[in-house]
Image: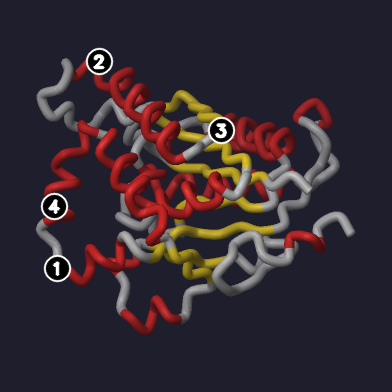
Amino acid sequence: MNKEMLLIFAHPDDESFALGGTIAKYAEQGVKITLVVATRGEAGKAAGLCKQEELGLFREQELSRAAKVLGITEVIFLDYKDKEVPISPSLEIVEKLVRIIRKVQPQVIITFGADGSSGHRDHRAIHHFTKAAIKLAKEFIEPKWGDPYILPRLCYVQAGWRLADNVLKGLDYIIEIKPWAEKKKRAIEEHKTQLFSQQKFEALDQKIKEDYYSREYFQCDFELSAFPGRGKDIFADMERVGS
C-alpha cells in the first residue's frame, strides 16, 4: 500500500516549526507527503531580506528549500491573502480542499487544532475549513470534484512547549524525532524571514528546546477519523484501510 500524508496549513514555515521532525521521519520511510498552504505569508516581516511587496515570492522560495530538506513531495498554494483566510470565500476554499483530498487520498491528514497552536486567525480558520472539506469529501456529491473519499485518520499538531506535562501525556500520538532533529533545524533555518521567531525560541528554557527537537505531539480527531488511534506511529494499523 502506498502511504500518503496530506498536510494543510496556513503559511510557509508552519510545516517546519510545527512538525518538521515528523515530516522528515515519514518521508524517509517512503511516505509521499503533500503540503497545502493557504497563503504565501506576504503580510509578515521581511527581516530586511527583501522588499515588502516581494515577501510572498521570497517566502515561497524559502518553503521550496525547506520542503526539499524535509522530503515533502509536493507543495500546493491555495493563493489566499495572508491574515485574510477567515474572510476568504469559504465555499471556494472547501471546494479546493475537497478536490485535493479526493485526488491525493491520504491515509493521514495533519493540520492545526481549533486553537491554531499560536492562536493566529489564519491557523484557526484553516482548521475549520479542513474539517468541513473532510466531511464533504466523503459524500456522493459534486462528482466533478473527484470520487468520494473517506479519510482514515485526522490529526492536529500540538505545540508541546506551550502545554503542561499532564496535557502532553494525554495526547494521542507522541512522535520521537531525535534522529531527524537536524533536518528540522535545517528546514527552520531556510525560513530566514522568520528570524524573530527563531530568536524568540532560542530564548526559551533549555529543557523546552530539548523536548522541541526530541518529540512532536498530535491529537487524533476520533469523530472525523474512520480509523482513529493512539501511540507512537501515526500510520499504525493503516493496513485495515480498504480491507
Pick the front one: 36 or 34: 34
In the image, what residue type sits under mark 2?
A: Glu
- Residue bearing mark 2: 54
Q: Would residue 161 appear left or right of 46 to someone viewing this image?
A: right
- Residue bearing mark 3: 73
Tag 3 and tag 4, C-beta contact below 8 Å: no
In the image, what residue type sits under mark 3?
A: Thr
Residue with the most extreme front position: 179
Please report whichever mark, 1 or 2, sits nearer to the chain's N-terminal start. 2
* Residue 26 screen position, x and y as percent: 55, 51
Tag 4 and tag 1, C-beta contact below 8 Å: no
In the image, what residue type sits under mark 4?
A: Lys
Q: Would residue 218 appear left or right of 20 to someone viewing this image?
A: right
Q: Is residue 138 above or below residue 218?
A: above
Tag 3 and tag 1, C-beta contact below 8 Å: no
Between circles 3 and 4, the one closer to the viewer is: 3
Pick the front one: 96 or 63: 63
Q: Local crowd at mark 1 within 10 Å, few (<14), some, or many (≥20)?
A: few
* Cα distance in 3D space between marks 3 and 4: 30 Å
Give the label on residue 205, or none. Answer: 1
Task: Identify the secondary structure beneath mark 4.
Answer: helix
- Residue bearing mark 4: 200
Question: Which residue corresponds to the image point at 60% horizontal and 73% vertical from the top-left?
Answer: 230
Task: Identify the secondary structure beneath mark 1.
Answer: loop
Between circles 1 and 2, the one closer to the viewer is: 1
Question: Which residue corresponds to the image point at 22% horizontal and 63% vertical from the top-left?
Answer: 209
Please report whichever mark, 4 or 2, sits nearer to the chain's N-terminal start. 2
Give the label on residue 157, or none. Answer: none
Total numbered labels: 4
